[in-house]
Amino acid sequence: MTTAALDPATLKLPENASLLTRLHLATRILRVIKGNEGNPVYGQTINRCLDQGVYATLVERLRGSEDGRRLLSERPSLEAGDVDLDALARLPEGTLGHELARYYRDNKISPFQTTLELKSDLDYIGKRYRETHDVLHLLTGYGTDVVGEMELQAYALGNLGIHTARLILAFGTLGQLKTPQPGVKRSEYLRRVRDAYRRGRASRLFLDVWFEHFWEQPVAALRERWLPPAERMN
């Protein structure tokens, strides 16, 4: 059953909105956003509700380094239309570019796409966070099933402190505890998301990474360079 889209006119966040108001509005959006993640109204409203302060902190961190300032200035994009999947697929097997193209093909999905107009560095960071989602699936090894998605949200929460990830994880965990996915006991699920969170905290900040510079590098080498092994989190 498809949930009806929300009228943009109902998504205006009041000035000085309370935490309860912001959580209520963000929850309404999360219920309808699946399959429409690129909707600029949905994306910007969730950011304003939950993660404006987080993104502002990340922007300041990026402005503190030469590479970060260049990333904010040039605003590289992993959005559909800016990534040549055919060219990436021609790279050697095992490289980040080749495996990302394979990931999209095998999962029968396409890169993130939005009509969001980037008016600030905060807008860019919010967009960059969303469009790195699939790269992170590849690098972390977390699956695209329900539990794998929750692991990736836990990883993002640990790495960046993203409140949207916290909210998604809370709803996903309640659902998993109520009706566990086949073959995944509640105790195993809780252990996996805990370990993913710890792994995110122990990893380098992934929004600092200009992934487009590493298409020809082996995924295994990048994973070893940027992430602690998942088994060390146990």
Image (cartoon, grey):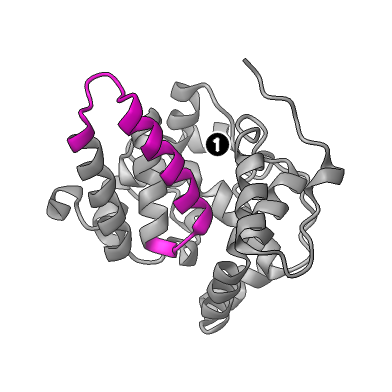
Query: Horizontally, is 47 left or right of 115 in the view?
Result: left
User: Residue 76: horizontal and vertical position, in percent?
Assistant: 62, 58
Q: Residue furthest bottom?
A: 64
128 part of magenta stretch: no
In the rendered picture of this protein, how many numbered marks are placed on residues?
Answer: 1
- Regarding mark 1 in the picture, which secondary structure is present there? helix
Q: Work out whether residue 128 or residue 66 is closer to the camera in this orientation and state it.
A: 128
Query: As displayed, is residue 213 above or below residue 56?
Result: above
164 part of magenta stretch: yes
Q: Magenta part mainly helix, strand or loop?
A: helix
Q: Residue at x 30, y 25 (%)?
A: 180
User: Residue 96: horizontal and vertical position, in percent?
Assistant: 40, 44
Query: As displayed, is residue 61 above or below residue 6?
Result: below
Q: Work out whether residue 175 or residue 113 is closer to the camera in this orientation and state it.
A: 175
Which quadrant, please, contains the N terminus?
top right
Q: Residue at x 37, y 39 (%)?
A: 173
Q: Which residue is drawn at 65% across and 56% down?
A: 22
- Tell me the quarter of the picture where residue 201 sits: bottom left
User: Residue 159: horizontal and vertical position, in percent?
Assistant: 38, 62
Query: Horizontally, is 123 left or right of 138 in the view?
Result: right
Where does the magenta region start and end? 159-187
Disc 1: which residue: 87
Query: As displayed, is residue 137 above or below residue 194?
Result: above
Query: As displayed, is residue 105 above or below residue 211?
Result: above
Query: Horizontally, is 217 left or right of 51 in the view?
Result: left
Which amino acid, mark 1?
A: Ala
Q: Using the rendered image of the protein, determine whether residue 76 is visible from the camera's viewpoint.
A: no
Q: Residue at x 39, y 30 (%)?
A: 146
- Tell me the quarter of the picture where residue 68 sits: bottom right
Q: Work out whether residue 62 or residue 169 is closer to the camera in this orientation and state it.
A: 169
